[in-house]
Amino acid sequence: MQQDMIVILDLGSEQNAQLAREIRALGVYSEIHPHDIAPEALKALPNVRGIILNGGRNRCVDGRDVDVTPEIYALGIPVISADHPASKAAVKLDAWPEDRAERAACLSEFLFETCGAQKNWNMDNFIADQIELIRAQVGNGKVLLALSGGVDSSVVAALLIRAIGNRLTCVHVNHGLLRKGEPEQVVRVFREELGANLIYVDAVDRFLDKLAGVAEPETKRRIIGGEFIRVFEEEARKLEGISFLGQGTIYPDIIESGTKTQKSIKAHHNVGGLPDDLQFELVEPLKMLFKDEVRAVGKALGLPDSMVYRQPFPGPGLGVRCVGAITRDRLEAVRESDAILREEFDKAGLAGKVWQYFTIVPDIKSTGVKDNKRAFEWPVVLRAVNTVDAMTATIEEIPWPVLHKVTERITHEVKGVNRVLYDLTPKPTGTIEWE
Ligand code: XMP
């Protein structure tokens, strides 16, 4: 490992992730660990230059007062403490300064003066380290990866290709619910440009047949998730000698599913749920990265911007935007209108400024006029939201000319659509997706 590290011990603060990001922004790698980490385990972490005891105002974890073992102060590593009573051996702050610049100055003094840390956290060093670590873990073995085309799985794929080349097998399952041009892009970038060993599975009919007539949203999700695992499992069984499974787990997944304080917000299953007789050791090279760092790694590995900076896209894909029971023609209306919306947002310079934007086609029809004839057709609903964490969201004020242009194009270019509506509902009360 090339990077110096600052360890944050979680003493109940809700700001651990933010603090880790602030330290990394200053050029020093940082990890969050539980307050009761064994001193030997802490000592075994590579290149620890400093320890931060990060207590919230309450300094309590799961309702109990907590403290670190005094042995922490005897490791010979500088300790800083904020909002937390600490031994005389520690640099003590009453609280973190509120002001960003003051916080950065205070952190810089600790990192560089007190700890003598090197400013060596950058994506090139990260990539070099991970290639070494992946090679050490995998040896001569083979790795399997479900490559959805999303940011995380794409970056893992690119990194694994660098590290082990054709001993990585990527499986891209096209379930028919991907956006326009997405499966083609995955094949082009990974198979043709990066020379990956890529298995492309056209499972469109299989998924759409299973979903036919199913209107209940959670049942739709379960079918899509369950079928995905079955298809992936079938492909895995055809291959021989694979003992590792690559996964695009990232740091927020780990923080969310719990250091001690952070309550488990959601269980994360990437390709969880594989049968027991298919046992793989996991390779998770991004598990210590925040999303913006994952993007920076993807960029450094040569992935196209359209893959690295793409907006979030739910696992069940367009399936949750084709409201109610999915039909092929209405699904095409979702896919085509989504492509138009994305194209017009790109042209208007809104891509990258709006967090998530897409179209929904509900299962209703209204009367309209097309070519002087009555047209009883679907409406397309536009949704464009901004958010920090997807827990709440606000509505983006899209300029009228953009809305007009999108409406004009969708009603003329998308088959079966005669109206366009704009969803003005923030979250709450609406969720971001309609299902
Ligand atoms: P909601 O609709 O809950 O969405 O406000 C919040 C964010 O999560 C995404 N989303 C999903 N992502 N599987 C996913 O991987 C899902 O089933 C799913 N449902 C919603 C949604 O696109 C938004 O970014």
Image (cartoon, rainbow, N blue to C red):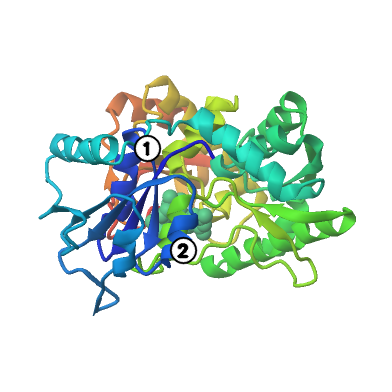
The quarter holding residue 86 reads bottom left
**Mark 2 Cα within 10 Å, few/some/many (few <14, many 20+)?**
few
At 33% from the left and 62% from the top, the residue drawn is 72
Left/right placement of residue 370 relative to residue 398 reads right
User: In this figure, which residue is indicated by the disc labeled 1?
Assistant: 28
Instruction: Indicate the quadrant containing the N terminus: top left, top right, bottom left or bottom right.
Output: top right
At 47% from the left and 62% from the top, the residue drawn is 41
At 35% from the left and 36% from the top, the residue drawn is 117
Q: Nearer the viewer, residue 139 or 164?
A: 139
Query: For the residue marked with disc 1, what is the amino acid?
Result: Val
At 13% from the left and 37% from the top, the residue drawn is 102
- Sequence order check, earlier mark of 2 and 1: 1
Kindly tell me whether residue 418 is visible in this rendering.
yes
User: In this figure, which residue is indicated by the disc labeled 2?
Assistant: 40
Q: Where residue 17 sits in the image (x, y, percent)? A: 33, 51
> Would you say the beta carbon of the disc 1 residue lies within 8 angstroms of ligand 1?
no
Cα distance in 3D space between marks 2 and 1: 22 Å
Kindly tell me whether residue 179 is visible in this rendering.
no
